[in-house]
Amino acid sequence: MSLPTSLDEAKGLWKQQVGAAKITWAKITEDEWLKLEGHEQKIAGLVQERYALTRYEAERQVRNFFDRLKRALPGKDDIQAQWQAQVVEARQLWDKLSEEEILGSGGQMHKLAVLVQERYAITRYAAEKQVQNFIDRLKH
């Protein structure tokens, strides 16, 4: 639901994009893609090496690839609008949270989990699990 707020989330998003990268540059293995972790300069270096391209051409291809990925991701306004549409469902699940608090979390799992943990006096793990389950249901 939200843009990555941590290095772990960004790495998770990269893992989701490895398939598209493998289609574009099949001579690079999945393990290599995962190790590159989305670092554009490292990817350009490997693309240059495997496909015998100039540095300029490899960087251009990688830049175009990332531009396409960025365009495919929802913008911040889209994400906020989607999150606002889910407030009613979230309020049914967590009636101790106000609409303002839920909206204020912006759909960020960490922020929402902290609120759930505080209001319901549960462990951090239990709160994160509830929030993850809620977000997973929204995706399906």
Image (cartoon, helix red, strand yellow):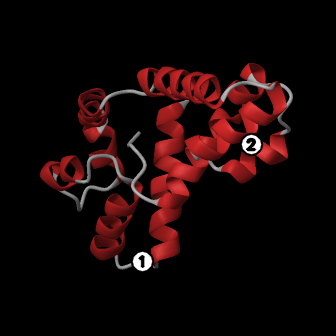
**Amino acid type of disc 1?**
Ile
From the image, tell me which residue sits under label 1. 122
- Residue 90 appears in the rendering: yes
- Report whether 114 appears left or right of 136: left
Quarter assignment of residue 57:
top right
Foreground pick, 38 / 50: 50
From the image, tell me which residue sits under label 2. 33
- Report whether 70 appears left or right of 118: right
Going 54% across and 59% down the picture, which residue do you hit?
8
Q: Is residue 64 above or below residue 38?
A: above
Q: Nearer the viewer, mark 1 or mark 2?
A: 2
User: How many tags in the picture?
Assistant: 2
In the image, residue 127 lies at what x, y percent? 45, 67
In the image, residue 9 lies at what x, y percent? 51, 53
Mark 2 Cα within 10 Å, few/some/many (few <14, many 20+)? many
Going 42% across and 77% down the picture, which residue do you hit?
122
Q: Is residue 119 above or below residue 103?
A: below
In the image, residue 61 lies at what x, y percent? 60, 22
Q: Earlier in the sequence, mark 1 or mark 2?
A: 2
Q: Is residue 111 above or below residue 121?
A: above
